[in-house]
Amino acid sequence: MDMQRLMAQAKKMQNSIASAEKELDETVYEGASGSDNAVIIRINGKHEVQEVVIADDLMDRENKEMLQDLITVAFGKAEEKLAADREAKMGAITGGVSFPGM
C-alpha cells in the first residue's frame, strides 16, 4: 500500500471532518412543543441555546409546570435534530466508521 496516498486520504478526511464540524456548529436546530408550537427553542450545533420563544398565553403562573414541560420537550426535539444531522454528515465522511470524540 502506498503510504503517501494513505496519508493524503487521511488528511482529506480530516479536512472534511473539520469542515462538517464547522457547518454543524453554525447550524441552528429548532424544537417545538405544544399546540400551535407554543414553545420553540433554537440551539446551535454546539448545543447552545440561541432563542426561546414562548406563546403569550403561557405566560401565566398557573401554567408554570406545563411551560417547564413544554420547554423540556422542545429542547429535546432540537437536540434530536442536531444528533441526527451530525450522525448523517459524519457518517457520510467516515463511511459509517465511528471515531472517538465525534
Image (cartoon, rainbow, N blue to C red):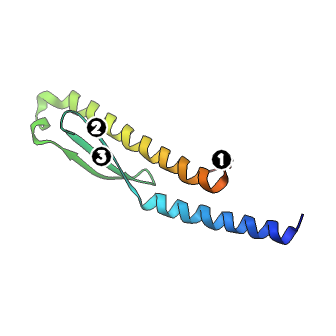
Question: Who's the residue at 15% across and 29% down the image?
Answer: 63
* CB-based contact (under 8 Å), mark 2 and mark 1: no
Left or right of residue 54: residue 100 = right
Classify mark 3: helix, strand or loop.
strand
Instruction: Name the spot of residue 31 as percent of width and height, x first.
Output: 32, 43
Question: Residue 47 at x, y = what percent?
Answer: 43, 50
Q: Which residue is drawn at 55% across and 47% down?
A: 87
Where does label 1 land, which residue?
96
* Callout 1 amino acid: Gly
- Residue at image mark 2: 71
Q: Residue 62's image quarter? A: top left
Of the residues tagged 2 and 1, which is closer to the observer?
Answer: 1
Q: Which of marks 1 and 3 is nearer the N terminus?
A: 3
On-image quarter of the N terminus: bottom right
Query: How far apart are the two marked residues, 2 and 1, measured between alpha carbons?
Result: 33 Å
User: Is there CB contact under 8 Å for labels 2 and 3?
Assistant: yes
Q: In the picture shown, does residue 82 fall above or below 2?
A: above
User: Is 96 above or below relative to 15?
Assistant: above
Q: Which of marks 2 and 1 is nearer the N terminus?
A: 2
Q: Do the residues labelled 1 and 3 touch (CB within 8 Å)?
A: no
> Does residue 55 appear to the left or right of 6 in the view shown?
left
Q: Which residue in the structure is indicated by mark 3? A: 41
Q: In which quarter of the image is residue 67?
A: top left
How many other residues sit within 10 Å of disc 3, few (<14), some (14-19) or many (≥20)?
many
Q: How crowded is mark 1: few (under 14 residues within 10 Å), some or many (20 or more)?
A: few
Against 19, is 43 above or below?
above
Task: Check disc 3 and give the amino acid type.
Answer: Ile
Instruction: Give the Cα separation between the discs numbered 1 and 3.
Output: 30 Å
- The amino acid marked with disc number 2 is Ile
Image point (58%, 64%), residue name: 18
